Amino acid sequence: MITLTRLVPEPVRRLHWIMLPAMLLLIAIGTMFIFSACSVRDEEKLKDLYVGHAGSAAAGLVIYLLLACVNYRNLLRGSWLFYLGAIVLLVAVLLVGTKTMGARRWVLGVQPSEIAKLAVILLVAWLLGRREAARQAESYLLALLVAGIPVALVLQQPDLGTALVFVPTVLAMLFVSHVSPRLFWLTILAGVMLALVVIAAIVTVETAQLSPRTETWVRQATGLTNYQQDRLANFIFPARNPHSGAWNKRQSEIAVGSGGVWGKGFRKGDQNLLGYLPQNVSCNDFIFSVLAEEAGFAGALAILGLYLLLLASVLGVAISCPDGVGKLVCVGVAVMMFGHVFVNIAMTMGVLPITGLPLPFISYGRTCLLTMMVALGFVQSVAIHGRQAAARF
């Protein structure tokens, strides 16, 4: 007698069925609140952004399921080509990319920096997970070089927030693969010292009476653009420029705090409807502010619960996978996603400086949405095919 389970293809039976509905729920919530955030816009095209978000999610779901059915190790053999393609797109951004709000981040309607994050994860996982001498220093330096090239190109756009996401992602993968522990901790120490020096320089410029020549030298020594320095200064000194540079931050804090426990109701958020929260950021970078004002603390807590469930699912696949390559892919995807969630929500609450990082699956942004869904498609492939691969650690 043929049982019902035998009629279902094996890859479908081995899908991680917690990860998939959590992702789809987040996308549905994102579509709903993008509609709310854009409903007050004047242009019909902008009012229909939620339709584009849902359409991108539908295309992403097809890719997600196709990737889940293919063995990830076969795909990762071509990770070099994917990485080189991402580098070409990043160079194209600097040469012919569209300039918006003082930065070049898009070319042909695509944001290559999002693609580069996944490309780095896949290539580093392939290089470290299959190297027999994974503890050697050259493996460590090779991983840093792979990450360093796109970071340098992203910084030229300039996009400091996106560039910083590469750092914890690659470091977490290096930590899990136990590559040169001494070099790893020296890198961590050097990074912390560099961050403290930059912050000290910005505080000195804002508080000390420096000569114009000295102030110019200190600003140039930070390696940051004036726009990035202003954002950090506005975060450190909130009263510095409340009606200009810190306006978005202040209005976002008001939106999040005014939601109360249960929120003001769908499409009833004053900060969004009255335009205090700028319309050009309410559906992407500050979508959490709209959500928190309309759904309140309860809604925000539900969103965090879904993200926690999604991240726990990805890490659960990593823990159960005996293959080093698959384990590193899952770790890289989990840290990348956590970085986006943590930084985006923290900046809307005023805990971190304002950056352009979107909230995964909820913020409007086709490239980010598709990249995150493709990343989870690889994780699903690890869940299905990871036990078939030989362990490399």
Image: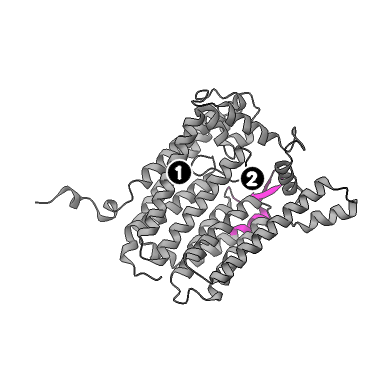
Which element type, helix, strand or loop, lies under badge 1?
Answer: helix
Measure the C-alpha gap from mark 1 to mark 2: 20 Å
Residue type, label 1: Tyr
Residue type, label 2: Thr
Q: Label 2: which residue?
A: 355
Look at 45% across and 52% down and name the residue there.
374
Look at 75% across and 32% down and name the residue there.
243
Q: Is residue 273 left or right of residue 2?
A: right
Which element type, helix, strand or loop, lies under badge 2?
Answer: loop
| Residue segment shown in magenta | 89-109
Which numbered disc covers residue 307?
A: 1
When the figure is inspected, residue 133 is found, relative to residue 311, above or below; the finding is below
* Number of other residues with Cα within 10 Å of mark 2, as a class: few under 14, some 14 to 19, many 20 or more: some
Q: Is residue 53 left or right of residue 384?
A: right
Q: Earlier in the sequence, mark 1 or mark 2?
A: 1
- Point out the image quarter for the C terminus: bottom left
Look at 51% across and 64% down and name the residue there.
175
- Nearer to us: label 1 or label 2: 1
Percent from the top left, x then y, of residue 31? 48, 35
Closer-to-camera residue (373/128): 128
- Asked if the magenta segment contains residue 180, the reply would be no
Percent from the top left, x then y, of residue 85? 55, 62
When the figure is inspected, residue 336 is found, relative to residue 44, above or below; the finding is below
Look at 73% across and 55% down and name the residue there.
198
The answer to which image quadrant residue 38 occupies is top right
Percent from the top left, x then y, of residue 104? 67, 50
Q: Is residue 298 left or right of residue 150?
A: left
Can the viewer see residue 106 in this picture? no
Q: How is the image coloured?
A: one colour
Can the viewer see residue 92 in this picture? yes
- Asked if the magenta segment contains residue 102, the reply would be yes
